[in-house]
Image (cartoon, rainbow, N blue to C red):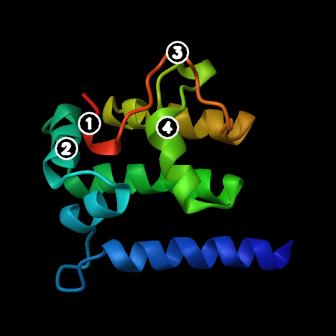
Amino acid sequence: MVFAQRKVANEFLQFLADIYDPATGIVSCVRLAASLGMTEDALLKRWIRRGTRVSWRQFSDELLSVLDVAQAQRRDLEQAIDWYFNCPIEPCGRKTADELVTAGETDRLLRELDTYGVRMHAVQDRARPRLVHGSHR
């Protein structure tokens, strides 16, 4: 069990190292978008939808905090990313984690994850088509 937890933590630390820009010390939008399987433009649109009061650093920190919790509970970063974009969360009005973070509801989402855990089902919800990360609204 400890080995599995250490492996999960190491995987997320490597993910963070890959997306940080060493010159600025902040998350690179280009690198994060590529790691999420989307275009830079699609990721920037999510940040812009959040509003002008939210810095890139805050937006990316919120997104990463949700992925960190999801990956720690699921023990697989790729599955956590898929869950983030594609799985509706019942207690949050069937919105995805992506929709909640973009809407500024990260605190609510993290509370739900702490209470109920990540619900990542092998069978996707039939009511919502599975989307490629860059094709979201």
3 and 4 marks in contact (CB < 8 Å): no
> Dot 4 surroundings within 10 Å: few (below 14), some, or many (20 or more)?
few
Query: N-terminal of the two: label 4 or label 2?
Result: 2
Which quarter of the rendering shows the N terminus? Answer: bottom right
Q: Which mark is on residue 42?
A: 2
Q: Nearer the viewer, mark 2 or mark 1?
A: 1
**C-alpha distance separating marks 2 and 1:** 8 Å
**C-alpha distance separating marks 3 and 4:** 15 Å
Q: Which residue is drawn at 43% across and 56% down?
A: 64
Q: Nearer the viewer, mark 1 or mark 4?
A: 1
Q: Which of marks 3 and 4 is in front?
A: 3
Q: Which of marks 3 and 2 is in front?
A: 2
Q: Which mark is on residue 93?
A: 3
Q: Residue at x 66, y 41 (%)?
A: 118
In the displayed structure, does residue 40 sit left or right of residue 111? left
Residue behind mark 4: 107
> Dot 1 surroundings within 10 Å: few (below 14), some, or many (20 or more)?
few
Query: N-terminal of the two: label 2 or label 1?
Result: 2
Q: Which residue is drawn at 44% across and 31% down?
A: 130
1 and 4 marks in contact (CB < 8 Å): no
Q: Which three-letter amino acid code belongs to the residue tagged 4?
A: Asp
2 and 1 marks in contact (CB < 8 Å): yes
- The percent coordinates of residue 40 (x first, y second) are 17, 54
Q: Which three-letter amino acid code belongs to the residue tagged 1?
A: Ser
Q: Residue at x 17, y 85 (%)?
A: 23
Residue behind mark 1: 135
Q: Is mark 2 on a helix, strand or loop?
A: helix
3 and 1 marks in contact (CB < 8 Å): no
